[in-house]
Amino acid sequence: MSLALTNDTKLPEVVPPLTRREATDEALRCYYCYDAPCITGCPTRIDIPRFIHQIATGDLSQAARTIMDANILGATCARICPTEALCEAQCVRVQDSRAVSIGRLQRVAMDHAMEHGTPALPQLEEGRGRVAVIGAGPAGMSAAAHLARRGYAVEIFEQKEEGGGLDTYGIVSYREPMRVSLFEVETVRKLGVKFHFGRKIDALQDFRTLQEQYDAIVVAIGMGKVPKWGIPGEDLPGVYDALDLVEQTKTRPLSDITLGPHVIVVGAGNTAVDAATCAKRLGASDVSILYRRGEAAMPAYRYEYEFAKQDGVIYRWWTMPIAIEGASRVEAVRCVKTQVRTGDPSDRQSPLDIIPESEFVLPADTIILAIGQEKNAGIGQMIGAATHRGRVVVNESTYETSIKNVYAVGDCLAPFGEAMVVQAVADGKMAAQAIHERLRKTMAPQKGEKHG
């Protein structure tokens, strides 16, 4: 992965790490609450006061151990988690000052683990059996790691050539370098998980074979591609899927990617911000984000919005493209202005109307679509599992599908929009626990038989 590491260097992280002194000073701000609300604000339930106290006392290895015991993808989440809306939002220090910088402290511990080696994790209650995981993204790797720590033989089947899913291929390098996600893949591998790369499970017979060979199956396939837009010109050269563009910046020389000076990004979620700020770093001088609704309905986190504006990205609210124009490639985009017909302007479900005689044209060398991904219910339909509105239906407490011993986790369950990596990790943990509860009953050793 030398190419990925080279691109990581060319697009350095925008948030610098804390120095050791800064980390100690920040850790000493924590009250180390006994009944810490920050823990309940974390979907993976990391013991936050404990790892911060370990940092304060200089034991970074134990701090990393505490984090990874709860969240095997602690290095990724330290960088991309919306901590200000989760754990830090619950910090009691907001009452007298500001929240402790939990995310940045977590990164200090996890960077130490990346540099000095992964600490040994405590063993969990032992189980027995074989489990197959389809997809090596955050949810799949989380489930695999927690099952492997219980002694299960776990194998992951991944269609790409590297693991990590969105973390590896879909997050821009200046937020999370590829080396971070690949470190986590290696960490899961060291737990005993076997990876099968370049293996796509897209035929019913493939799935039936897994059912015959494994005691449980975890489906963690993420979301699908950006859907077709349905307007003239969308197939012209110069129109990108936002995630495809991000993947190119991580797997190809940056000199191979030429966007031109005028870039239009369609959509206003976190992926749109990544695409827009990425375009800026690739040399575009004029980058605009078009959104058919107003600022109040914007899906992106507020800090992402501010980050884009600091990079010089222009937001054009109440603007909807209706056609892409150009002879042999993109030259312009024709737009109309919109308004809410009825309801709350901040509600993304409120119906819109096109304002009469509001057409206008924006020049564009490149158009990047960040309008959301399709729900990936294909495998659920293929195997006969129940689906609803494009998502696989699962038991809310166990994550089991309508097919016995087949579980589904992660973004393929997301009801709409963009899911959080940390929630995918939490899904994987909960599914692993449910599988363990099921298999330890059905596969309990007979009298005189040993686990093996």
Image (tube, grey):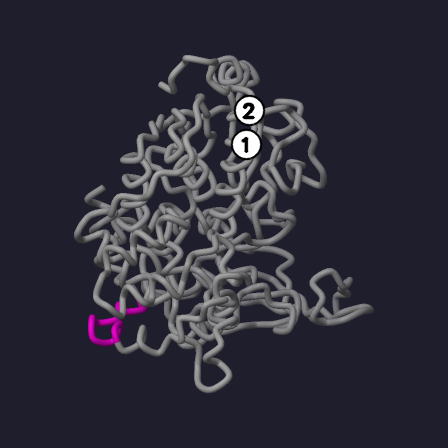
Say if the magenta span includes residue 18.
Answer: yes
| Front residue (pair 410, 158) | 410
Is residue 247 something that shows in the picture? no
Query: Would residue 360 be counted in the magenta stretch?
Result: no
Q: Residue 250: give x, y in percent of width and height.
A: 31, 49
**Which x, y percent locates residue 280?**
37, 66
Q: Position of residue 164 (x, y in %)?
A: 37, 42
> Residue 146 appears at what percent x and percent y?
42, 38
Most foreground residue, 322 or 106? 106
The mark found on residue 47 in the picture is none
Up the image or down, 157 lies above or below 397; here it is: above
Q: Residue at the spot x=77%, y=65% of the render?
A: 353
Residue at left offset 39%, top offset 66%: 49
What residue type is disc 1 on?
Answer: Glu
Q: Is disc 2 placed on a helix, strand or loop?
A: helix
Q: Is residue 313 above or below residue 59?
A: below
Give the structural element (helix, strand or loop) at label 1.
Answer: helix
The residue located at (29%, 55%) in the rendering is 64
How packed is label 2: few (under 14 Cα within 10 Å), some, or many (20 or more)?
few
Judging depth in this view, the residue of 328 and 154 nearest the camera is 154
Q: Which residues are magenta?
A: 14-24
Instruction: Name the residue that disc number 1 marks.
Output: 437
Residue farthest toward the front in the current orientation of the protein: 448
Looking at the figure, which quarter contains the C terminus? top left
Using residue 321 as the reference point, say whether residue 175 is left or right of it.
Answer: left
Label 1 with label 2: CB-CB less than 8 Å? yes
Q: Amino acid at mark 2?
A: Lys
In the shown orientation, is residue 208 left or right of residue 125?
Answer: right
The residue singled out by tag 2 in the image is 441
